[in-house]
Image (cartoon, grey):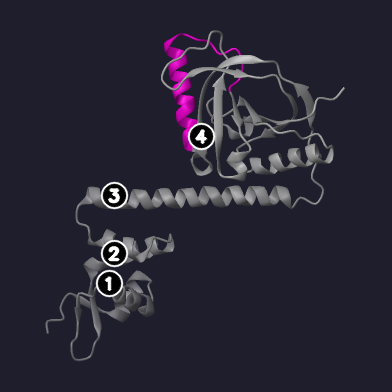
Amino acid sequence: MDMSGVLAIGKFSRITHLSIKTLRRYHEAGLLEPATVDRHTGYRYYSLDQVPTAQVIHRFRELGMPVREVGELVAITDPHARAAIISQHLQRVETQLDQTRAAVVSLRRLLEPNPAPREVLRRRTEATTVAAVRDVVNLGDVLGWYDAAMSELEAVLSSVSAVPIGPPGGLYDNELFTEERGMMVVYIPVDGPPTRGRVEPFDVHATDLATTMHSGRHDDIDVTYAALGTYVNRQALQVSGPVHEIYHVGPRDTDDSSAWRTEIGWPIFRTA
């Protein structure tokens, strides 16, 4: 057997900084076939050309890419197809990182030994007719539906030169949270709301609310919701009705998430 141009597994291990055990595991999983295997001794030999492939496999396994997808990746010779698989996985990794950061932020708030009391105000909203998009939405689809609905609202209002006369807002039925499916309404206040596509006039009724302000990203907005809900229930003020959100400053206004301000309103009994 011609052994020129190949490396024993030990040397290949030292070059790639991958243990012999790891290289054997990659072979057994079909991820990295040795350049040749001595049929008498079973010794594995690798070529120098396999060094980048071995390190790519290692990096993607570190990022949690499933063995099946890694195998598909290294088997693909078309650079565009390979880039598509890599892009899909990196998107999953970024989403997982965002979810981890959100969980850390929420835990830090929840574990504060003496959290500052949250300011809760009681106020009555006035009845108004707004331009709105509404639909029954699954809880897992809320963010995507909101972005699409708000984009459609903005496009329609711009096409008819309608100028907002207040901040955008949303109404969220209780079933959205309790049953993971419920009515959502997003709206922008304008004079003479148009009817076009999914956009239509919608009456927002006058409502008594207990409100508080959530600052920053929405990753931990559930903590603010819980604080407001606790206040409302302790005061025995709660009534049925959709939760109100008013987006005084949001991602459509600035990329600086520290400046975002979302007012949350919980329907309550009217009190003197």
- Between 140 and 259, the one nearer to me in the picture: 140
Verify whether residue 160 appears in magenta.
Answer: yes
Q: Residue at x 60, y 17 (%)?
A: 203
The residue at which mark 2 appears reads as 71
The picture quadrant where one finds residue 40 is: bottom left
In this picture, residue 27 sits left or right of residue 35: right
For disc 2, the neighbor class at 10 Å (few under 14, some 14 to 19, many from 20) is some
Q: Which amino acid type is shown beneath numbered disc 1?
A: Gly
- Between 77 and 92, the one nearer to me in the picture: 92
**Which region is colored magenta?**
144-168
Which of label 4 and label 3 is nearer to you?
4
Residue 136, numbered circle = 4
Q: Residue furthest bottom?
A: 40
Q: Residue at x 27, y 61 (%)?
A: 72
The residue at which mark 1 appears reads as 30
Q: Marks 4 and 3, how far apart in space?
A: 37 Å
Q: Which of marks 1 and 3 is nearer the N terminus?
A: 1
- Between 207 and 66, the one nearer to me in the picture: 207
Q: In this view, does 251 lie above or below 30?
A: above
Q: Marks 1 and 3, how far apart in space?
A: 21 Å
In this picture, residue 99 sits left or right of residue 267: left
Which of label 3 and label 2 is nearer to you?
2
